[in-house]
Image: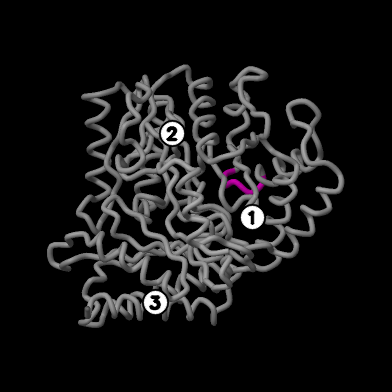
């Protein structure tokens, strides 16, 4: 068995649109490490794209799923439900910020959560319009793709997109877009493109994922809350990548003190099992008629059981505090690297907890993005045994999503690989 042989088979059997970042075929995984079919070891700084905050195969999660596997694997919660479905809804209702009573609906993917949040918002308000932001990523299904504010590769060749979707600029201090700029653009949108009384919801990521780990300033999120309240618009907070202790809080929106009307969740909710959720104010969640939302696999019992174990692990192992520590350790290392004259390609380092970004540029003065260098760094790190991800509108951001359960020693080993790889590339 070899990685190349599997890649050849994949190329013959799988369409090119479903790309894989690395031609590495995993044989087994444990916590923050992977081993491929050739026996090579990799440190995992990707976490399955933010899915594994609790690491690969956490013993408590594995044990819970094995026990459920011996009982039943599927009945469809819309036909014959089960306790873990209800118990998880109760826990999420209690965890999502704000004092307003909450209810939760389960789905299978993040895109499904986003689309259903929009459906719920439209049902509640009787309005069609939705506003999202430039650089946003909300999924690959048609409505979610329309909400996504990044063309390549997500929108190329897939139009036309659903109507009544609008975009405003997301604040980005490094790229010269202030909070005031964003709010003025939103005000202009209401005057030139869609009347506020036609808008059902504004959807926003408190930290953009694919967009480059751009952090929404608290005052921006607070202003959106105020605008929504003034105009009868619902505020949907997309926590699909930011949730479950990644940012030093259970949810990133907690850094702003804002209560969402609706919140979407997925990824690390179930520790590697397919599960997403929409949690929102009970009155709003009850807007769709019976049968108006749901799905055959929504809230699968293996996934809901895993999610209950995930929440236990986050609490018992103090992963919120661990996220803060990891953020300081990793972002601190990047900032130290950036101070070196030889690594002037590091234009910006930003983080909220352990959601960490390093933006690479050709010139610090012009801030011209360096996507080629970023791609080369991901490849060089892979050669040295590190799984690394890039992101950003310009493809020039390295993002860190290492499991929160990773040891300091393992994290430092991964950071050493990044530093050595970048040194080699800039000196070549």
Element assignment for label 1: loop
The earlier-in-sequence mark between 1 and 3 is 1
Residue 204 image point, x, y percent = 41, 41
According to the picture, the residue beneath numbered tag 2 turns out to be: 144
Q: Earlier in the sequence, mark 2 or mark 1?
A: 2
Q: Residue at x 74, y 65 (%)?
A: 59
Instruction: Measure the C-alpha gap from mark 2 to mark 1.
Output: 23 Å
Q: Residue at x 35, y 75 (%)?
A: 334
Scheme of colours in the image = one colour
Q: Is residue 398 left or right of residue 248?
A: left
The stretch drawn in magenta includes residue 372: no
Can you give x and y, in whole percent of width and height, for residue 383 in the image? 41, 72
Circle 2: is it few (<14), some (14-19), or many (20+) Cα within 10 Å? many
Question: 233 or 67: nearer the eye?
Answer: 67
Query: What residue is shown with label 1?
Result: 271
Residue 321 in sight: no
């Amino acid at each position: 068995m070899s990685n190349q042989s599997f890649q050849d088979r994949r190329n013959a059997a799988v369409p090119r649109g479903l790309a894989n970042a690395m031609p590495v075929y995993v044989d087994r995984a444990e916590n923050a490490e992977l081993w491929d079919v050739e026996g090579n070891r990799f440190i995992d700084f990707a976490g399955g794209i933010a899915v594994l905050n609790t690491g690969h195969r956490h013993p408590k999660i594995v044990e819970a799923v094995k026990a459920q596997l011996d009982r039943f694997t599927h009945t469809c919660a819309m036909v014959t439900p089960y306790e873990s479905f209800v118990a998880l809804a109760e826990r999420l209702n209690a965890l999502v910020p704000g004092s307003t009573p909450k209810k939760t609906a389960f789905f299978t993917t993040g895109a499904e959560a986003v689309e259903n949040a929009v459906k719920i918002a439209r049902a509640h308000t009787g309005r069609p319009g939705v506003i999202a932001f430039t650089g946003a990523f909300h999924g690959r299904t048609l409505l979610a793709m329309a909400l996504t504010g990044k063309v390549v590769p997500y929108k190329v060749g897939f139009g036309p997109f659903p109507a009544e979707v609008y975009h405003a600029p997301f604040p980005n201090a490094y790229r010269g877009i202030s909070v005031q700029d964003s709010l003025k653009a939103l005000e202009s949108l209401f005057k030139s493109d869609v009347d506020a009384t036609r808008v059902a919801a504004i959807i926003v990521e408190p930290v953009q994922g694919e967009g480059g780990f751009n952090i929404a300033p608290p005052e921006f999120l607070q202003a959106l809350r105020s605008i929504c309240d003034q105009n009868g618009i619902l505020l949907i907070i997309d926590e699909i990548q930011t949730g479950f202790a990644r940012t030093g809080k259970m949810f990133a929106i907690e850094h702003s003190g804002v209560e969402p009307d609706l919140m979407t969740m997925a990824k690390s909710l179930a520790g590697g099992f397919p599960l997403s959720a929409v949690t929102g104010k009970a009155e709003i969640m009850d807007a769709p008629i019976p049968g108006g939302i749901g799905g055959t696999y929504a809230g699968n019992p293996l996934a809901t059981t895993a999610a209950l174990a995930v929440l236990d692990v986050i609490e018992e192992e103090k992963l919120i505090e661990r996220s803060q520590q990891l953020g300081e350790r990793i972002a601190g290392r990047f900032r130290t690297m950036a101070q070196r004259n030889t690594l002037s390609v590091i234009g910006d380092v930003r983080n909220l907890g352990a959601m960490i970004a390093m933006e690479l540029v050709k010139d610090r003065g012009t801030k011209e993005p360096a996507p080629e260098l970023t791609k080369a760094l991901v490849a060089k790190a892979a050669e040295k045994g590190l799984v690394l991800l890039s992101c950003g509108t310009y493809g020039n951001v390295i993002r860190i999503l290492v499991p929160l359960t990773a040891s300091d020693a393992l994290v430092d080993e991964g950071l050493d690989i990044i530093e050595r790889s970048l040194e080699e590339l800039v000196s070549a």
